[in-house]
Image (cartoon, helix red, strand yellow):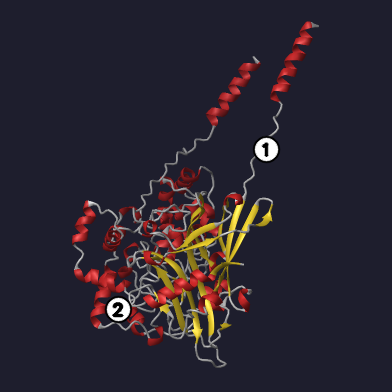
Amino acid sequence: MKNLVFFFIILALISCRKEKVGFNPTPYNLIKPTHFPNMVIPEDNPLTKEGVELGRFLFYEKRLSGDNTMSCASCHFPQNGFSDPNQFSIGIDGIAGTRQSMALVNLGWESFFFWDGRETTLEGQILEPIPNPIEMHQSWKDAVSKLNADVNYRNHFFRAFNEEGIDSIKVAKAIAQFLRTLISSESKFDIMYKYENGLTLSSNEQALFQSIDPEEWAGYDLFKSLNGADCFHCHNGPLMRVKKFSNNGLIPNSINDFGRAIVTNNPEDNYKFKVPTLRNIALTAPYMHDGRFATLDEVIEHYSSGIHMSPTIDPLIEFGSQGGVQLDAQEKYLLKKFLLTLTDNNFINNPNFKDPN
Amino acid sequence: MSKFVFYFLFLMIIIISCKKKDPEPQPVDNYLKITIQPTYMNNGIENAVLDSIYTTPEGYKVKFTDIKFFITKMKNGDNDLFESAILDYREFGNLLFRGIGDFNKFSSLQGYIGVDSVLNHSDPSAFPNESPLNISNAGTMHWGWNPGYIFINLEGKVDTIPDAINNLDHSFSFHIGTDTYRKDFYFSNVNWQTVSTTEKLFPLKLDLWKFLHSPWSPIDLKTEFLTHTASGQQALTIKVVSNFQQALTTY
């Protein structure tokens, strides 16, 4: 009799158990471009299909802003290489920032974020814009509360993290997973890089290789030439940048932004900013940390004749004392031709990166 | 009674068999560490500090802003210590290498400044994540155009006008690479210093005073301030490599 009662109690408990969404995370098969280094993914945030999918929804989620009008994508437009065509992004209260929104590309290989490098993890970077009063201006508590009110999100989060409940860390982790999939590696430049380094080209790449015209090659030579444009010191390798902060000879802007020195408190870092990638550069205007240059021509002119010398100028701006590398009109034309080879249309048009709604 | 004895014995057997074994002593790893301390002035005693201003014998003001170089194939005979290491003074201070090893096997050491031609022409993305040669770690120390690694990277600023104003607006950059300029070194009778019971240290120094002001081939930063190992820069390239080799010494 006793056993029978016990059996019924167990049966009742099992039958009354709340139905849960299953947790079967599927590892996300991130395809590393053959000419890229391995991506170091944090052990506590492995990529899963569920996490990446959730991150994609969150990236385009306007409820993360105080008045439900702004998402991450509001300042990082896919068609602009996930950057902002405006000089400064405008937050929900109509307040403009003081630095240009950086392009979100190949972030899985970055080890510091923002123009001043104040964040050292992608997850940490993502935590900033939502509570920032001049950006999305919403406390994490409110943002999480809005997501919690949506049963779809509750299910999404459970599928991604195997836990009830949503918090800012999980939001950041999911968005970071999505951002790590934003890989650009299929431009004409990639073919040139592979060819130059003796790496095997696929048949599709062979076809693209044939389409690279002599002016683009000449522009590339100029880009790498010590006595030409001399760009390669800072824009190098498959990621088209080096990991460093540099004062590239800009005249300080009206707010006298000290850049990296704000983080380090070291005057040797005055006016130094993160060296950005040049990938998709034709799509990511305006340029520089303050978006002061509207076109690539202005950028080329800066390095050609507009260098402003200062105590912390990068020693690798070797012709700085002459105002720049002094390119003639033909050289500027060729250099621009090369810069256009950095556009990766497969990346820009990738349906997996677009708004899922 | 016999039942009691049986249960007692059974219990004892279980207790004995379940007794936790004493943990076997784990072998202790012995670490070897190599540091290379850049020095300048005072006969090589004073440690060089990046961004600090020094005065050269010519009266120039000079500061170093970046000191990086690759050391590879460090070994003693058939005993390999490491394949490649980078000294990045700004990022990691004077630490070149720390790893497991038996100092008895390394009573002398030989190696190279720079990387061999095989490594130099390999895909820089294909090295393991932890390798200093991986493009993610090498960063500015890999040339896209050469292609290959920068073996030695010394950068800084100089004021060659001897007045009271420290106007260091003149840059110098010594970027040495290409297969030709890999250089070897050899230290006999390596004196491993005891840091702890499990760690030994071999401290080296890079005497930047000797590097710049070699009595045989001094570098005049007023006129000799730039080499990327390009054609037309051979004379300075050879001088930089040779002086660097001489400047890498024991204490």
Point out residue A215 in the picture as x, y percentages from the top left corner.
21, 71
Is residue A20 placed above or below A4 in the rendered structure?
below
In the rendered structure, which amino acid carries the disc numbered 2? Asp
The answer to whether the residues at label 1 and label 2 have Cβ atoms under 8 Å apart is no
In-image side of B220 versus B93 (left or right): left
Name the outermost residue toward the right.
Answer: B1
Point out residue A14 in the picture as x, y percentages from the top left corner.
55, 28
In the rendered structure, which amino acid carries the disc numbered 1? Pro
Residue at point 42%, 55% (across, down): A180
> Of tags 1 and 2, which is closer to the observer?
1
Q: Quadrant of the N terminus of chain A?
A: top right
Residue occupied by mark 2: A297
Q: Would you call the spot at circle 2 few (<14 residues within 10 Å), some (14-19), or many (20 or more)?
A: few
Q: Chain for mark 1?
A: B
The picture quadrant where one finds residue A267 is: bottom right
Name the outermost residue toward the top.
Answer: B2
Viewer-closest of B54 and A45: B54
Viewer-closest of B188 and B230: B188
The picture quadrant where one finds residue A263 is: bottom right
Q: Would you call the spot at circle 1 few (<14 residues within 10 Å), some (14-19), or many (20 or more)?
A: few
Q: CA distance from mark 1 to mark 2?
A: 69 Å
Point out residue A39 in the picture as x, y percentages from the top left corner.
43, 54
Q: From where the camera sits, is residue A234 visible?
A: yes
Residue occupied by mark 1: B25
Res. A220 mark: none
Viewer-closest of B140 and B212: B212
Point out residue A140 in the picture as x, y percentages from the top left corner.
54, 59
Viewer-closest of B106 and B189: B189
